Amino acid sequence: MVEPPRDAGQLKRDTLARLDHDIDVWVASAGQQGDPYLVPLAFVWNGATVTLATPESSPTGRNLWASGRVRLGFGPTRDVVLMDGTVQTFSRETVPAEVGDAFAAKNWDARVENTRYAFFLVTPTRIQAWREENELVGRDLMRDGRWLV
Amino acid sequence: MVEPPRDAGQLKRDTLARLDHDIDVWVASAGQQGDPYLVPLAFVWNGATVTLATPESSPTGRNLWASGRVRLGFGPTRDVVLMDGTVQTFSRETVPAEVGDAFAAKNWDARVENTRYAFFLVTPTRIQAWREENELVGRDLMRDGRWLV
């Protein structure tokens, strides 16, 4: 059954709740040859930025480091939050303590893995959310880094 | 609770069942400037290829048409099937009848939308599947277009 469309305030509340509570996110990146990459990763949201951690030598790690751009897909395919963002990259030596600690508190401490993990701070530039086609109008919650709601 | 790892045969059976029955898939593509894109779309699997349909003028439509490359993520983030593929693009005039008919039978007839839809036939080159970390070894089911299982 298709639910009635949510108003903008409800869309934003549902979006922030998902960012606070979800464990994993679909992370889309692109290589320098234009090859798309996609993998689910654990994340943590601090109210303004998303932190991801993945091995430095993985495709996602290399793509985010080189391009500084990411698109994230949260939620199931019929209740999505989509976020475009710019990426700031840290090694495990340069990651600010509060960033590494926040990731460790929600997920695990990726700073002490045998494999070298990098940390990626994603600052959202655009956020969209929708469940079904009836919400595709008015789905933009953030544009150019500013909440519209 | 983490389930025990599945053997390769079970992984393949579960993968084929997901391709047969799931409705939507996460579609990752890349623009010519190296910008990643990601959106959930309806699909149909015929046992060898995935068919997608999306407006010709959408970011995914333009990216797939220009690059001929895609990476697809099926399932929830803790029970994934990941597929790299090459893409053959058709307009609604050039799409083979059996391709348009199969998409319409499972989803809806995108050939008669007011917006011009394009059809994308994805031939998999690599398929991976896993639930949790304990399945990350042995997750490759297809490489270079050949099933390993």
Image (tube, coloured by chain):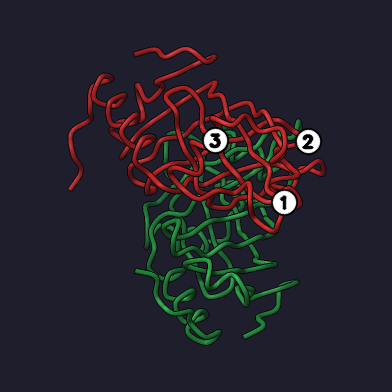
Chain colours: A green, B red
Q: Which of the two labelled residues, at mark 2 and mark 3, occupies the earlier sequence position? A: 3
Crowding near the residue tagged with mark 2, few <14, some 14–19, many ≥20 C-alpha atoms within 10 Å: some
Crowding near the residue tagged with mark 3, few <14, some 14–19, many ≥20 C-alpha atoms within 10 Å: many
Q: Nearer the viewer, residue A108 or A139?
A: A139
Q: Are marks 1 and 2 on the same chain?
A: yes
Tell me whether the residue at label 1 lies in contact with that at label 2, contact meaning CB atoms closer than 8 angstroms: no
Q: Position of residue A84 (x, y in %)?
A: 66, 60
Q: Position of residue B141 (x, y in %)?
A: 39, 20
Kindly state the secondary structure of the residue where label 3 is placed.
strand
Horizontal side, residue A23 vs residue A145: left or right:
left
The disc at residue A87 is none
Chain letter of mark 2 equals B
Residue under numbered circle 2: B66
Q: How many marks?
A: 3
Label 2 to label 3, Cα distance in Å?
17 Å
Foreground disc of the pair 1, 2: 1
Label 1 to label 2, Cα distance in Å?
17 Å
Horizontal side, residue A105 vs residue A32: left or right:
left
Please give the name of the residue rendered at 70% of the width and 51% of the height, measured from the top-left corner. A69
The amino acid type, in three-letter code, at marker 2 is Ala
The amino acid type, in three-letter code, at marker 3 is Thr
Quadrant for residue A78, please give it.
bottom left
Foreground disc of the pair 3, 1: 1
